[in-house]
Image (cartoon, helix red, strand yellow):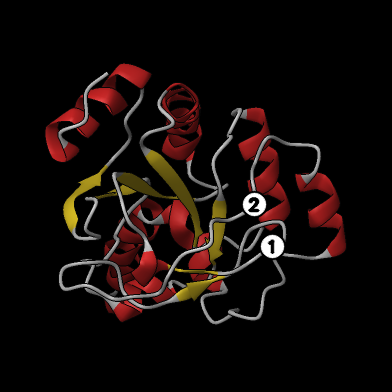
Amino acid sequence: MKPLLLVVLVLPFLVACGPSSPGRALHAQSHLDVGSSDLVAFKKQTDIPNCPKVVATKVDGGMPAVSLPCLGGGRAVDTAGLRGPMLVNFWASWCNDCRKEMPALAAYAGRHPGVKVLGIDYLDTQPGAALELAKASGVGYPLVADPSATLDKAGPLPHIAGLPFTAFIAADGTVVHLEAGALLTEADVAAAVHRYLGVTG
């Protein structure tokens, strides 16, 4: 009876963590090629721009010094060099709430060029599906990939237990707020940007 009881107790936890299972099952696959020729060709059919060139200068309270590959090819991005006002959005192709949130982020980014947006395809081993989702959502901001959760290991961000997850970065590079959960409308995004970054419009 004891083994059966253990299964009963563990099963709800596994079900609750279901959306993250595809990434966690291949957690060590840091060698995943997110810039293969087919992905590069597909990205050219989207509005996703090249990844930004950043100066990798770490600041206290900022993002960790981790170099992430550009999804669909291009220059890598050292997150320590990110400067705001900026939203850094963690998402994945397998995340249902991310699918709901991404069009709102895309709409906001398209109408507010003064606020930068960077998407991080996180714990996702399906870069093709990720690019397809981004294209379908109208994404016009750069995307990088972190299939093995390198940022989570490096800190100082708290453990990212679920997606979507958004970091709000000020002009000096400090992370001023971390938001767990989806911002489902463009108005939700705008309100959060105003609240945490002081940007209106």
Q: Position of residue 121 (x, y in %)?
A: 52, 55
- Three-letter amino acid code at the position of disc 1: Gly
Tag 1: Cα neighbours inside 10 Å, few (<14), some, or many (≥20)?
Answer: some
Q: Is residue 198 above or below residue 69?
A: above
Residue for point 30% across, 17% down: 187
- Three-letter amino acid code at the position of disc 2: Asn
Q: Which residue is mark 2?
A: 50
Disc sitting over residue 74 in the figure: 1
Tally of numbered tags: 2
Disc sitting over residue 39 in the figure: none
Nearer to us in this view, 87 or 146:
87
Q: Quadrant of residue 85?
A: top left
Nearer to us in this view, 43 or 179:
43
Cβ atoms at labels 1 and 2 below 8 Å apart = yes
Q: Quadrant of residue 4?
A: bottom left
Q: Position of residue 60 (x, y in %)?
A: 16, 73
